[in-house]
Amino acid sequence: MPSKAPAAAVALAARDRCGPSPAYQLLLAPALDDRCDQPSVEAIIDPRVIDGNAVRGMWPLYLGPAQADAYVAPARAADLSDLPPAYLMICEQDPLRTRHSTTPAG
């Protein structure tokens, strides 16, 4: 299953499978974690933007009966070391912003 944060998933897979490493990760408001337990998911409740309800609803649609792993939701990775540098764009009204600010990137 492809990731909702494809650059991060590719970087993880390349590292874990000894493949060629990307030079850089461009993460533009990525969905890194399916657990939806970050405070900003609860704080953003404006239906005019992607809010917490939309985030909670997208994961079951995306995953179906499958369970998330680190290649689908990179914040689940136990080890985020040895990844290429990343540019991480987050927005003020991004319901995933608190996860982004606490997830280390390479």
Image (spheres, rainbow, N blue to C red):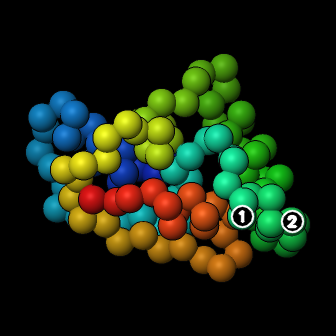
Image height of 49 relative to 67, above or below: below
Q: Amino acid at mark 2?
A: Ile
State the separation of the CA atoms marked 1 and 2: 9 Å
Q: Residue at x 67, y 26 (%)?
A: 64
In-image side of 97 versus 69 (left or right): right
Identify the disc placed on residue 4: none
Image height of 3 relative to 51, above or below: above
- In the rendered image, residue 44, in percent from the top left (x then y), is placed at 80, 67
- In the rendered image, residue 65, in percent from the top left (x then y), is placed at 66, 20
Mark 1 and mark 2 lie on one chain; the one further toward the N terminus is 1
Identify the disc placed on residue 40: 1
Mark 1: secondary structure: helix
Q: Residue at x 71, y 36 (%)?
A: 61
Badge 2: residue crowd in 10 Å (few <14, some 14–19, many ≥20)? some
Q: Nearer the viewer, residue 56 or 100?
A: 100
In-image side of 25 versus 98 (left or right): left
Q: Amino acid at mark 1?
A: Ser
* Quadrant housing residue 17: top left
Q: Residue at x 72, y 60 (%)?
A: 39
Q: Please state, as top left, top right, bottom left or bottom right, where the C terminus lies in the image.
A: bottom left
Image height of 73 relative to 52, above or below: above
In-image side of 15 versus 6 (left or right): left
Mark 2 = which residue? Answer: 45
Residue 83 makes an appearance in the image: yes
Image height of 45 relative to 22, above or below: below
Q: Nearer the viewer, residue 79 or 22?
A: 79
Mark 2: secondary structure: loop
Q: Residue at x 60, y 77 (%)?
A: 91
In-image side of 36 versus 7 (left or right): right
